[in-house]
Image (spheres, grey):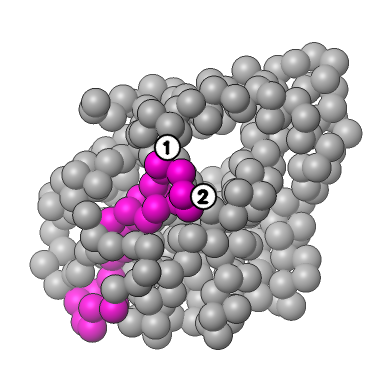
């Protein structure tokens, strides 16, 4: 099945921020409870070691959840990198919440950052968690080309994959939204209104979840993206990560200037 470029509601500039932020808060909770976010760390840790990076520029941060999970896991591995959260639609409250208890390792940028044209002063290892699928091929290629042009390594990670079991799980999202909204952070009382009294949050999360599933780049499609780049002196790692015992996989793409190749990591490998 080929990737389909449909429209996610949260990508629309006019879409209400209260719903957009609720959707990202739900995804942050799901990633934290499932433990899948931490499974993305091994290939990223190897790449950070290979590049010597001490700072992560997280693009398309949303609610900041995956980046905080990954930052904590990196610190546990002896890699206490500084993380700057950025987004085209910044969520300062969520960024501040992600920074709590991080001992100064995490900060947020309140001005918009376009992943296809990152300000030159934002140097560091770029990451995109669960958001690369938002970009159609031309813009996805532009995200990677901007990293190449500015000589900044980049890692793209997606917990959702175009697998039947993943779609089955996404179809249960309305129930998950209904019962977990009190646990979303940083909490907003307005989310109860749009979930329990006027149930708009459930169809929004369901629609965007299914569209995300259809838009995810497969390993072969990621290879096609980098094949068209003018980056002869770059190394690209593209692979999958098994998500526990379920028949589910995350995908990743890591690009960096040519140098020492990261050692293989358990649970992940080029596909």
Please tell me which residue is depicted at 75% across the width and 16% down the height of the picture. Answer: 199
Q: Is label 2 in a helix, a strand or a loop?
A: loop
Residue under label 2:
60
Residue at mark 1? 134
Residue 120 in the image: state x and y as whole percent: 42, 68
The relative height of residue 46 versus residue 227 in the rendered view (above or below) is below
Question: Would you say 75 lies left or right of 116 here?
Answer: right
Residue at point 54%, 74% (across, down): 74
Q: Is label 2 in contact with label 1 (beta carbons under 8 Å)?
A: yes
Question: Is 184 covered by the magenta stretch?
Answer: no
> Mark 1 falls on what kind of element?
helix
N-term mark: 2 or 1: 2
Residue at position x 55%, y 85% from top? 78
Residue extent of the magenta highlight? 239-263
Residue 254 in view, yes or no: yes
Q: Residues within 10 Å of mark 1 (few under 14, many from 20)?
A: many
181 left or right of 32 in image: right
Is residue 90 something one can see in this rendering? no
Which quadrant of the figure contains the N terminus?
top left
């Amino acid at each position: 099945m080929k990737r389909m470029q449909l429209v996610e509601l949260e990508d629309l500039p006019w879409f209400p921020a209260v719903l957009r932020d609720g959707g990202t808060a739900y995804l942050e909770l799901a990633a934290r409870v499932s433990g899948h976010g931490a499974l993305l760390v091994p290939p990223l840790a190897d790449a950070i070691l290979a590049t010597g990076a001490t700072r992560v520029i997280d693009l398309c941060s949303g609610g900041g959840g995956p980046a905080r999970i990954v930052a904590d896991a990196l610190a546990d591995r002896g890699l206490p990198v500084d993380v700057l959260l950025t987004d085209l639609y910044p969520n300062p409250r969520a960024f501040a919440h992600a920074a709590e208890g991080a001992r100064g390792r995490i900060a947020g940028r309140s001005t918009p950052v376009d992943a296809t044209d990152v300000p030159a002063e934002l140097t560091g290892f770029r990451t995109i968690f669960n958001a690369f699928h938002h970009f159609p091929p031309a813009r996805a290629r532009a995200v990677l080309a901007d990293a190449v042009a500015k000589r900044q390594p980049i890692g793209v990670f997606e917990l959702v994959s175009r697998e039947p079991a993943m779609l089955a799980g996404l179809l249960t999202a309305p129930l998950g939204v209904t019962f977990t909204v009190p646990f979303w952070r940083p909490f907003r009382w307005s989310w109860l209104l749009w979930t329990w009294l006027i149930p708009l949050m459930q169809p929004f999360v369901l629609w965007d979840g299914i569209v995300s599933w259809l838009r995810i780049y497969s390993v072969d499609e990621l290879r096609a993206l980098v094949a068209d780049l003018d980056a002869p002196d770059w190394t690209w790692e593209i692979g999958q990560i098994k998500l526990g015992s379920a028949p589910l996989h995350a995908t990743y793409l890591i690009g960096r200037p040519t140098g020492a190749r990261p050692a293989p990591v358990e649970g992940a490998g080029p596909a």
